[in-house]
Amino acid sequence: MFRVTRAEEQAVRLTMRLAADGGQKTLSELAVDEQLPEPTVAKLLGMLRRGGVVHAVRGRHGGYVLADTPEAISAGAVIRSVSGEDVFEFPCHDADVPPDCPRNTDCGLRPVWRHLGERVAEVLEQTSIADLLQREATQSRSLQELWPLASD
């Protein structure tokens, strides 16, 4: 099922905070700004650093900065830094069809799951941190223009 974990959302919010404030922030400042415990922020920043989303600046006046511009960092990249995988997973893939599935050779549902997963990945990859800093109404209009919903 499509699910964004709490850690993934917190990582996106930390990245947004760095982008909105523009420049370097300490772990403590980020923890206060996002109302998160420092150990949680430390863990997430470590993942974001290993994922290439942020850089750590060492020294007495150290902190964290974005590794690129907010326009160049996608929400998908931030989420993958934390989870190590795509957000949308479905139970059966071509290579590892469950052996107990009665439709393991020809399934009409598998292409639906695959298509949905690719669309979710597409939206996350094409949504930058700069996009996420927009006001909610502006972002809603932008999403509807890019990926219109039939119900709207």
Image (tube, rainbow, N blue to C red):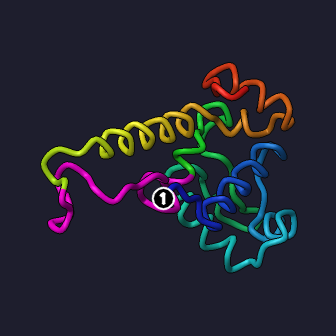
Q: Is residue 39 above or below residue 118?
A: below
Q: Is residue 42 above or below residue 4?
A: below
Percent coordinates x, y for residue 67 in the rendering = 59, 45
| Furthest-front residue in this view | 102
Q: Is residue 150 left or right of residue 38?
A: left
Question: For residue 29, what is the image quadrant?
Answer: bottom right
Q: Is residue 86 left or right of residue 65?
A: left
Q: In front: 40, or 69? A: 40
Percent coordinates x, y for residue 100 in the rendering = 18, 68
Q: Amino acid at mark 1?
A: Met
Q: In front: 39, or 74? A: 74
Magenta stretch, main secondary structure, is loop
Q: Is residue 56 above or below residue 20?
A: below
Residue for point 74% across, 77% down: 38
Q: Give the residue number, with chain letter if any, for mark 1.
A: 1
Question: For residue 107, what is the image quadrant?
Answer: top left
Q: Is residue 30 left or right of residue 65?
A: right
Residue for point 82% across, 43% down: 20
Is residue 5 magenta-colored?
Answer: no
Check disc 1: other Cα within 10 Å, few if <14, some if 14-19, many if 20+.
Answer: few
Q: Is residue 11 above or below residue 123?
A: below
Residue for point 80% across, 70% down: 31
Residue for point 84% across, 38% down: 136
Tally of numbered discs: 1
Q: In front: 63, or 144? A: 144
Start-end of magenta stretch: 79-102
Query: The residue tagged with tag 1: helix, strand or loop?
Result: loop
Q: Quadrant of the C terminus?
A: top right
Percent coordinates x, y for residue 35 in the rendering = 84, 70
Is residue 99 magenta-colored?
Answer: yes
